[in-house]
Image (cartoon, coloured by chain):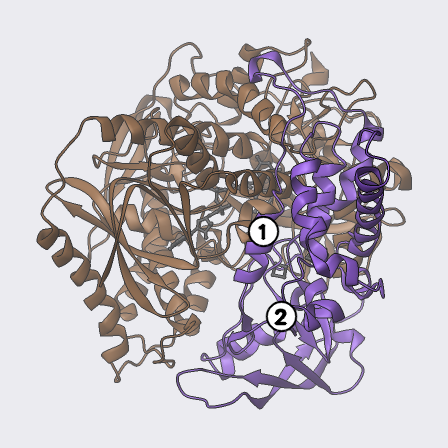
Chain colours: A purple, B brown
Amino acid sequence: MSELQQRQIQLEVLRYNPETDTAPRYQTYSVPCLEEWVVLDALNYIKDHLDPTLSYRWSCHMAVCGSCGMMVNGEPKLACKAFIHEYKEGQIKVEPMANFPIERDLVTSVEDFITKLASVKPYLIPKEDKPVSAGEFKQTPAELKKFKQYTLCINCMLCYAACPQYALVPEFLGPAAISMAHRYNQDSRDGGRDQRQEVIASDEGVWECSFVGACSEVCPKHVDPAGALQQIKVASTIDWYKEHLMPWMKK
Amino acid sequence: MEIIKADVAIVGAGGAGLRAAIALAEADPKLRIALISKVYPMRSHTCAAEGGAAGVIKSDDSLDLHFSDTVGGGDWLSDQDAVEYFINEAPKELTQLEHWGCPWSREADGSVAVRPFGGMKIKRTWYAADKSGFHILHTLFQTSLKYPSIQRFDEYYATDLLVEDGRCQGLTALEIRSGEMKQFQAGAVIIAAGGGGKMFPFTTNGNIKTGDGMALAYRAGTPLKDMEFVQYHPTGLPNNGILLTEGCRGEGGVLFNKDGRRYLQDYGMGPETPIGQPVLKTMELGPRDRLSQAFWGEQKKGNTVKTPWGDCVLLDMRHLGEKKIDERLPLVRDLCISYLGMDPVKEPIPIRPVVHYMMGGIHTDVQAATRLPGLFAAGECACVSINGANRLGSNSLTELLVFGRRAALSAIAHLQSNQVPSSDTALAAKAKESQNRIQALFDKSNGTESISGLRQEMMDTMEENVGIYRTGEGLAAACEKIAELRQRYANITLTDKTHVYNTDLMQALELGSMLDCAEAVTVGARDRKESRGAHQRLDFTARDDENLLKHSLAHYHPTEPPRIEYLDVVVTKSKPGVRDYSGAKK
Ligand SMILES: Cc1cc2nc3c(=O)[nH]c(=O)nc-3n(C[C@H](O)[C@H](O)[C@H](O)COP(=O)(O)OP(=O)(O)OC[C@H]3O[C@@H](n4cnc5c(N)ncnc54)[C@H](O)[C@@H]3O)c2cc1C
Ligand code: SF4
Ligand code: FES
């Protein structure tokens, strides 16, 4: 196995501290990076060796906790999955996630997302009552497969940073929250679709979404939120027809 | 200082904290629950758990077998009354999660699937592909959103417990977003703040696992138990310590040394089993302590593979085939390709043991109660103890659920004893002390020590002297060094003196927690003159049941090393015996 390659990289990092800065600014750090590193390793190097005042979120360093979303050279990325070797230039620009208010440096506000996630009732609303003592609900691998992909969302919010609709209409529930509603709607154990549908159908953003698919492109977990949105929109349209044009038909 | 009143305050919103919160909300919707966490709940490190959660459900299994696997796996240091409670509750808790929507992997008939795990005689590990902890955490978090009585304080860093009149009556916490200190007054407090693997440099643990919860309880005067038992996981990626789940071996992956030998047979885990036909509790399905120790042996013999990241052995999964790997171990494949540039479908993966889990923690009884009235603990920060000297993989996720709930029930019972809270002024004075401690960090300008510098010295010491095999000499040196670092910690300087999202301050506080815990680990290890489970001494190689079938309890001292007390292990039906991991021999 070959020796590890090292390269000096200039990291241009957006800095903003509301207590001391009137506006965001950029600060450049020169970091000796191993090629196998990710951008997060470079930030940790800065924090430990160059500038302890830099703030950013991280925990797992394995792309599963969803903390470290940021813009790397203008693209929404997990800093722990943005590999140095993919940036051939000697310079990398790191900024906080787009479309969210900056709290400080690379830290953006999560509150809006959490509120939206909670609003779609992202939990099982059981179709039938069954006590725990009666054992598990049966679910075949095929039934599981129907929604499995949408359970993989790590709430990293990269899809919001990429979404042109969210940039325009901040009220838009957004790709991840809608995918999560879809996840439970598709679960064979669930009977809560009507309750979730009320929230989703009244969201103008859903109807405005132009399916450019930017969300699915940046999603590090291949959740395909654009696909979920499409499906949910079709289902909502059918609901609407049933209710307004064919009221004799049951949903 | 703003005062927030709650009936129960929970520190930590990982698997254990969330389970406790839900149990409280379900038991009584009128309870005011404050769920305090230094990160958003879904960032908690439970999300990183891959392999699965153990609980008896299949007809070929029995509670007795899960009991004996756990007690033997723990090298008889587990409290057997606690294990019994745990085993009994486990299937209910895992089924409860299923009812909350957890996407467990399934058999063709729609029942929940189970997989083999190290040290378990029967397949009993429930899994959701290789993202089990992730799905458990998100299922719990999302379910918690149902309950309006769970009030979350996300990104609040707990700094001190409020102890007055001999009872825990709340805590102080910094709101990270503003830097403001808040005082939580509560009838009961549950600590569920996770482990402290970050005191070691090479670990599967995330950045947040700095032993804060253990340190909170410890500093408040309640002891830490069995801290010397630190688990190495045998299969970590060599460059950054990312875990490859035990499920890799459960599904049939095998370990080779540089000569292509299945070396585990040379360490009492043989005879060799045919490739692709794993035998439970044998070879690659031995327990973690034994496998990590075997790696050390191979390293000493010069049988390891040299890589740019140091000595490794090889984990070969190629014979499982792409389809099975993608179905059962998709994350493992992704992690290997992304972080190591190697595909387990095509080549063996170099791996080495990595610090993974702390068996020790806040001393609690079977009811999850600490010795401090009003204070309860659950999850990795607690030591009940079911894990003894070596945790069996997949018992921990279940433990979060069983004892998270148990802590909640005990907290409710404590509230029902209707003790009158101490006066507001007395509690406020305590809170003020905590605030002053933080303020002192801001005021000091002549400190000479750097936070990252001290942290590095601590990690180097732990790695060098408190690893898989330990010696009296090394441990004595480590004790001295950690004591020195604790003193020097008084001279650290904050570079960042602002308040909003000050991660320099967080790191300073976390370093303080880790140093306190590290001292309990090193002193406990130095004084335990035997080899048991994950604690292996080259100078005391045998288990000593006559003198040391005992838990160690470390009592905090602000400037001196901890005092160690010993407590008998609860033995009900399984007398200490020989750990046999050569199942095929019989
Ligand atoms: C990579 C990996 C894989 C694993 N795989 C398995 C497996 O397959 N099966 C198994 O059984 N076990 C597994 N384990 C072990 C198991 O996952 C952990 O022991 C368990 O998830 C710990 O959960 P917890 O709720 O105790 O703590 P965590 O999930 O770590 O949560 C701790 C919580 O405490 C909070 N907190 C900490 N300090 C403070 C503070 N000062 N103030 C406020 N809040 C604070 C954090 O914000 C967080 O919410 C694995 C562990 C790792 C690291
Ligand atoms: S859908 Fe994908 S990009 Fe969006 S939050 Fe979830 S994991 Fe992140
Ligand atoms: S640090 Fe957890 S996703 Fe990047």
- Looking at the rendered structure, whether the residues under marks 1 and 2 are on a common chain is answered as no
Q: Residue at x 74, y 44 (%)?
A: A182
- Is ligand 3 less than 8 Å from the beta carbon at label 2? yes
**Dot 2, how many residues are within 10 Å of its Cα: few (below 14), some (14-19), or many (20+)?**
many
Mark 2 = which residue? A40
- Left or right of A148? Residue B536 is left
Residue B252: image quadrant is: top right
A205 or B118, nearer to the observer:
A205
Q: Is residue B337 visible?
A: yes
Horizontal and vertical percent for residue B167? 17, 39
- Which label sits in the foreground, 1 or 2? 2
Mark 1 = which residue? B204
* Label 2: element kind: helix
A151 or B236, nearer to the observer:
A151
Could you tell me which quadrant the C terminus of chain B lies in?
top right
Horizontal and vertical percent for residue B575? 42, 13
Residue type of the residue flagged with mark 2: Leu
Q: Examine the rendered structure and indicate whether residue A45 appears above or below residue B97.
A: below
B190 or A128, nearer to the observer:
A128
The subunit carrying tag 2 is A
- Is ligand 1 less than 8 Å from the beta carbon at label 1? yes
- Left or right of A129? Residue B306 is right
Residue B352: give its label. none
Residue type of the residue flagged with mark 1: Thr
* Label 1: element kind: loop
Horizontal and vertical percent for residue A68? 61, 65
**Dot 1, how many residues are within 10 Å of its Cα: few (below 14), some (14-19), or many (20+)?**
many
Q: Quadrant of ligand 2?
A: bottom right
B293 or B47, nearer to the observer:
B47
